[in-house]
Image: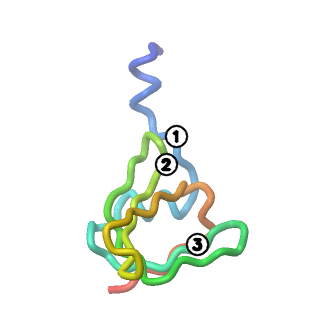
Amino acid sequence: MGIEDTNRQHRCEGCVCEQLDDLQTGTLVDVFLSGGAVFTGLTFVNFDDRTCCAFFTQTTAPGATLVLDCEKMQGIRIFG
Protein backbone atom coordinates (compact mmCIF):
# COMPACT_ATOMS: atom_id res chain seq x y z
CA MET A 1 0.00 0.00 0.00
CA GLY A 2 1.54 3.30 -1.10
CA ILE A 3 1.25 6.77 0.37
CA GLU A 4 -1.43 7.68 -2.15
CA ASP A 5 -3.59 4.71 -1.08
CA THR A 6 -3.21 5.64 2.61
CA ASN A 7 -4.40 9.21 1.97
CA ARG A 8 -7.62 7.94 0.37
CA GLN A 9 -8.67 5.93 3.41
CA HIS A 10 -11.17 7.40 5.82
CA ARG A 11 -9.41 8.06 9.09
CA CYS A 12 -12.34 9.45 11.08
CA GLU A 13 -14.01 7.06 13.48
CA GLY A 14 -17.19 7.18 15.48
CA CYS A 15 -20.91 7.53 15.20
CA VAL A 16 -20.93 11.34 14.92
CA CYS A 17 -18.34 11.28 12.11
CA GLU A 18 -20.48 8.80 10.19
CA GLN A 19 -23.58 10.99 10.64
CA LEU A 20 -21.73 14.10 9.46
CA ASP A 21 -20.46 12.26 6.39
CA ASP A 22 -24.07 11.75 5.26
CA LEU A 23 -25.53 15.08 6.48
CA GLN A 24 -26.89 17.56 3.92
CA THR A 25 -25.52 21.09 3.77
CA GLY A 26 -27.86 23.55 5.49
CA THR A 27 -29.13 21.09 8.12
CA LEU A 28 -29.72 22.63 11.56
CA VAL A 29 -27.94 20.78 14.40
CA ASP A 30 -26.87 20.98 18.04
CA VAL A 31 -23.42 19.59 18.88
CA PHE A 32 -22.35 18.07 22.20
CA LEU A 33 -18.59 17.93 22.79
CA SER A 34 -16.76 15.31 24.84
CA GLY A 35 -15.74 17.93 27.43
CA GLY A 36 -19.36 18.91 28.11
CA ALA A 37 -19.65 22.04 25.96
CA VAL A 38 -22.76 22.37 23.81
CA PHE A 39 -23.20 24.39 20.62
CA THR A 40 -26.84 24.99 19.73
CA GLY A 41 -28.45 26.30 16.58
CA LEU A 42 -25.60 25.46 14.21
CA THR A 43 -26.03 25.17 10.47
CA PHE A 44 -23.99 22.38 8.89
CA VAL A 45 -21.77 23.54 6.02
CA ASN A 46 -19.35 20.72 5.17
CA PHE A 47 -17.44 17.69 6.46
CA ASP A 48 -13.91 16.69 5.44
CA ASP A 49 -13.42 12.99 6.15
CA ARG A 50 -9.66 13.26 5.54
CA THR A 51 -9.11 15.76 8.36
CA CYS A 52 -12.19 14.92 10.49
CA CYS A 53 -13.12 18.62 10.42
CA ALA A 54 -16.79 19.58 10.41
CA PHE A 55 -17.71 23.14 9.38
CA PHE A 56 -20.70 25.03 10.79
CA THR A 57 -22.12 28.55 10.87
CA GLN A 58 -24.08 30.22 13.68
CA THR A 59 -26.71 32.93 13.41
CA THR A 60 -25.18 34.52 16.54
CA ALA A 61 -21.82 34.96 14.77
CA PRO A 62 -22.55 36.16 11.22
CA GLY A 63 -19.65 35.68 8.81
CA ALA A 64 -17.82 33.28 11.13
CA THR A 65 -17.22 29.58 10.55
CA LEU A 66 -16.98 27.13 13.44
CA VAL A 67 -14.64 24.19 12.76
CA LEU A 68 -14.89 21.13 15.01
CA ASP A 69 -13.16 17.74 15.08
CA CYS A 70 -15.86 15.09 14.69
CA GLU A 71 -13.91 12.67 16.87
CA LYS A 72 -14.20 15.10 19.80
CA MET A 73 -17.98 15.24 19.51
CA GLN A 74 -19.99 13.15 21.94
CA GLY A 75 -23.30 13.60 20.15
CA ILE A 76 -25.25 15.54 17.58
CA ARG A 77 -28.92 16.51 17.47
CA ILE A 78 -30.22 16.75 13.90
CA PHE A 79 -33.32 18.83 13.17
CA GLY A 80 -35.52 18.38 10.18
Residue occupying the point 60% across, 74% down: 32
Q: Nearer the viewer, residue 56 or 48?
A: 56
Position of residue 67 relative to residue 50, above or below, is below
Contact between marks 2 and 1 (CB within 8 A): the answer is yes
**Residue 39 is drawn in which quadrant?**
bottom right
- For the C terminus, the image quarter is bottom left
The amino acid type of the residue labelled 1 equals Arg
Q: Quadrant of residue 27?
A: bottom left
- Quick check: 24 left or right of 52? left
Image quadrant of residue 23? bottom left
Residue 52: which numbered mark, if any? 2
- Residue bearing mark 3: 75
**Are the two marked residues, 2 and 3, in contact with CB atoms closer than 8 angstroms?**
no
Does residue 14 appear to the left or right of 62 in the view shown?
A: right
| Distance (Cα) linking label 2 and label 1 | 8 Å
- Among numbered discs 2 and 3, the one appearing first in the sequence: 2
